[in-house]
Image: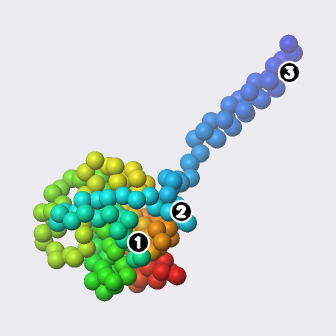
């Protein structure tokens, strides 16, 4: 084989290999698991709350449901909890709120919460099953908002203040 042709074939082979390596290592767009994407019906689930009550999504039909995924070790999560509590207190007739502690659980959540007077129900995802079902991100806090008909209208990570929550809830009612 001629040296020029040999060099050309090697160059082509290396270019193909480089293209494959780049394609395989491109960051993948995170997609919500089935039923957690905006516009989809959130699958029914049940969560046992720390106060002994049971939160059953199906029982919340007719209300906007706000699920806050948080953790005691997440500073932005702690900062936004009062806004979720205020939403529950001021709009309990049309809004249902659940605060779900994500994994890993590094502290006694009940003990941590004993220093506060929150009225929202808190649940802990001890085994990670709810996190899997709700497609909990590795970035906390995360908020899911479900319309009164059970359709996801919002599912994103990042902090929300009370005014933003109220806007999202108002949009979910329409």
3D distance between C-alphas at marks 3 and 2: 55 Å
3D distance between C-alphas at marks 2 and 1: 15 Å
Secondary structure of the residue carrying tag 2 is loop
Q: Where is residue 23 in the image (x, y as percent from the top left)?
A: 64, 41
Residue at 44 percent of width and 58 percent of height? 43
Query: Residue 15 falls in which quadrant of the image?
Result: top right
3D distance between C-alphas at marks 1 and 3: 70 Å
Secondary structure of the residue carrying tag 3 is helix
Residue 113 located left or right of residue 140 = left
Q: Mark 1 points at which residue?
A: 61
Q: Where is residue 171 in the image (x, y as percent from the top left)?
A: 50, 80
- Work out whether mark 1 precedes mark 3 in sequence or the reverse, and give the earlier one: 3
Secondary structure of the residue carrying tag 1 is loop
Query: Residue 81 falls in which quadrant of the image?
Result: bottom left
Residue contact at pointers 1 and 3, CB within 8 angstroms: no
Q: Residue 5 has which mark?
A: 3
Residue 146 located left or right of residue 39 = left
- Work out whether mark 2 precedes mark 1 in sequence or the reverse, and give the earlier one: 2
Q: In this view, does 118 lie above or below 105?
A: below
Q: Residue 125 has which mark?
A: none
């Amino acid at each position: 084989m001629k040296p020029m042709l040999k060099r050309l074939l090697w160059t082509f082979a290396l270019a193909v290999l480089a293209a494959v390596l780049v394609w395989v290592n491109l960051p993948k767009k995170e997609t919500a698991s089935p039923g957690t994407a905006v516009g989809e019906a959130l699958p029914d689930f049940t969560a046992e709350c720390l106060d002994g009550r049971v939160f059953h999504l199906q029982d919340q039909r007719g209300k906007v449901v706000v699920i806050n995924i948080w953790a005691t070790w997440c500073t932005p999560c702690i900062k936004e909890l009062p806004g979720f509590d205020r939403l529950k207190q001021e709009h309990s007739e049309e809004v249902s709120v659940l605060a779900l502690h994500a994994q890993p659980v590094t502290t006694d959540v009940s003990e941590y919460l004993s220093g506060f007077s929150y009225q929202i129900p808190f649940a802990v995802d001890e085994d990670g099953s709810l996190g899997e079902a709700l497609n909990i991100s590795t970035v906390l806090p995360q908020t899911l908002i479900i319309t009164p008909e059970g359709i996801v209208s919002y599912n994103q990570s990042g902090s929300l203040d009370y005014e933003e929550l109220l806007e999202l809830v108002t949009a979910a009612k329409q």
